[in-house]
Image (cartoon, grey):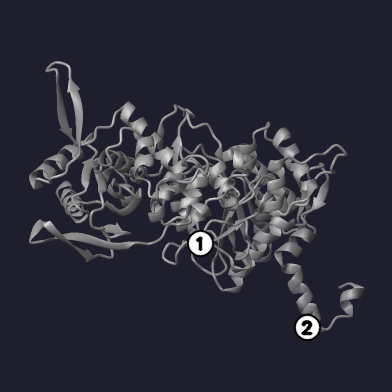
Amino acid sequence: MTAETAQLTKEQLSYAEMLEREPVNWCASHCWIVDKTANRVPLIMNIAQMHTERVICEMQTAGMPVRIIVLKARQHGETTRGAGRIFRNVNLFSNRSALIAAHDKDATLNIFRKIQMFQDENPTQLSARYSTRNELTYDAPHRSYIVVETGGKEHLGRSAKYDYIHISELAFFEQPERTMLSVKQCVPRLPHTEVVLESTANGTGGYFHNAYNKARKALCDKDLSYMVIEDPSEDEWNGYCRVFNPWFIDPQYSMTVPSEFEITEDERQIKSRYDLSDNQIVWRRWAIAELCGGDEELFKQEYPSNDREAFISSGRLYFPATQLSYLEQHCHPAVIGRFMFAGTPDNPRLESNEHEGWEIDEFPVADRIYAIFGDPAEGLDPTETNDPEKTDRSVAQVMDVAAKRIVAKLRCRFHEDVFAEQLVLAGMWYNQALLGFELNNKCGGSLKSELKRFDYPNLYRKRRYDKISDEFTEKIGWTSDKVTRSMMYNDLRQMIRGYQPYYKPEIIIFSKDTIREMFTFIVDKDGKQRAQNGEWDDEVASLAGVVQMAMDAAGSVCLGDFIGNTMNNEERRIDREEFTVDNLAYAGISDTAQDLEEDENEEF
């Protein structure tokens, strides 16, 4: 007891001891690290680290098991913070177990060396021993321990029960789904337990991105403008709170402004949007040049300004992110139902269905022209996957041709006969819409037979020239090959991108699920358009298909004719005046208006 504490009352002394045990204070007194200048210093948490601690405290105060997912920028020290907190927990509480996992062996070794330094430099060191598998175990009667392992293992943590788990760079694990399935089994859902998942972004889609989207803001973060991804619904919430820190909250990311400094227009917009200083802009300019090799997109990935930008900038999206983000803001729930016969197929009725069925955003309007495209499932055997959600699904989209508006969507696991029946009934309901479908796979052939059996009066027919017979023939259904596939996706991309002078999307989409799929639709290293690994693209394919059907229904030879001949601005719900550069940049995705001026003939 010091001279200062001797003057405290019993209650004051108890409060002081409680404060000393708080993670931020305890780590500053018991954990030592080597800083960026190679000096031995106490672990005094920075703003980003204290932000994570604040969210953890909020969950603990609410009596909840701590479940945190952290989207981080480089060099904010999140892994060091997590290691320090876990070291504190196993020191203060007996019979506790902790696992820290990293994405590769080098990172695992670095984390374990941090733990070793914490132990060696701790002024109140408990007796402990090290094992050959990166494990620190405290002697009896304390018996708490920390294990540091390399991720990518399906059995990670399976053989033990852990109170605390910290997963570092989860987005870069080889098999994050299987790894996390194993990890979740070994942490009981008790208030004292903690699971922290942290990573820099690694493109849209994938386990980490999806888990972040299903997490929600902590109450203390509700008003943070740079956390722009919407909270999930209560049903979608995965029990995690999300944490995000933009690069500019770190006071170290600042440099002296040189006398010859002149701010560019791009930098002026960024400065205004995030209320930055010239010192921060100078550091940003230096970091792009020196840390990111002059690649501004890489800077956005490593040092994001908002949580949406982090994911978008770290992937190679096929569709323009700014327009997708704008469309996403106008998505909304739709009525769910299934079409039924009312005597004959000519007179269908729509019955409410809370489960699998059509999402109806707009009922048919007399004399309007509609188009439908059905993309049947591949017919893959569900036993080929352990996850029933990964089995293939059939998708159909309905478009109002003149308004270029998606008015209904079906995503289902119906057999071909039921899927065909729903397409026919929807087609009749929407004024005998032009009905097309993907013919390529074996289910496409079955679907064709079913549709012919219904004798639907307005099936899409592809007109082809037969060199042998010297005649034109018609073939029912849409066949995708290398040429037509590229064409249909390019036309959809152009409709999303829009035309000068506004670069506003020329299509209206109500389904947030469709937009989310488009966010995970990429151009791979071979130049092929496809879904990112582990993601779907059937809604994107059906959307691209219905655009082709709408063009045919409008009698358009090319996309430009379709846009020019059928546009009716007065009937479009999204007001063109809303679509300004300021609105485009609301999420910090497009830093300048010039970002929208990309080459219309851009090749992928």
Look at the picture and state if 394 lies above or below 17: above
Tag on residue 194?
none
- At 30% across and 59% down in the image, what residue appears? 360
Looking at the rendered structure, the secondary structure element under dot 2 is helix
Q: Nearer the viewer, residue 479 or 140?
A: 479
Q: Dot 2: few (<14), some (14–19), or many (≥20) neighbours within 10 Å?
A: few
- At 83% across and 45% down in the image, what residue appears? 39
Residue that mark 1 sits on: 231
Look at the picture and state if 558 lies above or below 458: above
Q: Quadrant of the N terminus?
A: bottom right
Residue 94 visible to the viewer: no
Residue 460 at x, y percent in the picture: 20, 39
Residue 250 visible to the viewer: yes
**Cβ atoms under marks 2 and 1 closer than 8 Å:** no
Look at the picture and state if 7 lies above or below 511: below
Left or right, 254 with respect to 158, comes to right
Left or right, 573 with respect to 198, comes to left
- At 25% across and 58% down in the image, what residue appears? 364
Looking at the rendered structure, the secondary structure element under dot 1 is loop
Residue 517 at x, y percent in the picture: 41, 46
Residue that mark 2 sits on: 11
- At 74% across and 49% down in the image, what residue appears? 117
Which residue type does callout 1 highlight? Asp
Which residue type does callout 2 highlight? Glu
Left or right, 17 with respect to 238, comes to right
